[in-house]
Amino acid sequence: MSNDIDLKQLEKKAYLSYHQDGLIDICAGLILIGFGIAMAYDLAWMIGIWIVTGLPVYASMKKAITIPRLGFVKFKLKKEEEEKKKKMILFSIMTIVGSLFFIFTLIIMNDMLPSWINDMIKEYYLVILGATGASFFAMAAYMFELKRFYLYSLTVLAIFIIQHIIDIEPYWAMIISGFIITLTGLFIMVRFIQKYPIQKDIEFKRES
């Protein structure tokens, strides 16, 4: 029994360490910056390219930075299935919410709602956008046990509220949020590299 508990604790520690390299933070921050640039220069097509190219870049950086230091960690089969399910759920939610938000935007832009609702939503549109983005970070924090993502969630929401109050260009809210998250990720990566020197692969055995 104690061996099982030790293995679970070791497995959890390895899992958390595996996500303490700052890479996911950097990628999330760069995506926000990309959104901001696309918004600033009206390059909507750039958003899709940014997301699609981000995944293989993340995987490549993981192989170059994380795996040589922590090894290729294989968790229990059940744990792997749970992780895949969480990623699929988060991706599905983001896709659905993003699609609904796009439809919602079209409805507002074409004045398809009563004028008073339309005016109110237009007034707070960017705050709603910020809250939507913040919710993604909060979901990621909860599903993947990344507590710092709760802070990112609050940061994004706060910056969009400030943007609404001082009335700066909306793309700056995206860029500033992304810049803060990217810098934090770089700081975490530097600490990770200093803490974990390159070593031989470490591997957990699969268990059903």
Image (cartoon, rainbow, N blue to C red):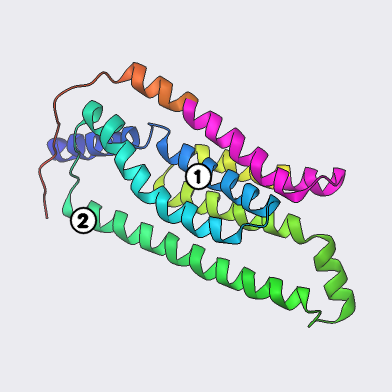
Residue at the spot of label 2: 78
Seen at 15% across and 31% down, the residue is 202
**Residue 85, how many percent across, how many down?**
32, 61
Determine which quarter of the picture holds residue 124: bottom right
Q: Secondary structure at mark 2?
A: helix
Q: Say whether residue 153 is left or right of residue 21.
A: right
Q: Is residue 112 visible?
A: yes
Task: Give the Cα separation between the discs numbered 2 and 1.
Answer: 27 Å
Estimate how packed mark 2 is, as few (under 14), some (14 to 19) or many (20 or more) residues with alpha carbons within 10 Å: few
**Residue 62, how many percent across, how many down?**
31, 37
Magenta stretch bounds: 160-186
Determine which quarter of the picture holds residue 168: top right
The amino acid beneath tag 2 is Lys
Tell me the number on the disc at residue 28. Answer: 1
Q: Main secondary structure of the magenta part?
A: helix
Q: Mark 2 or mark 1: which comes first in sequence?
A: 1
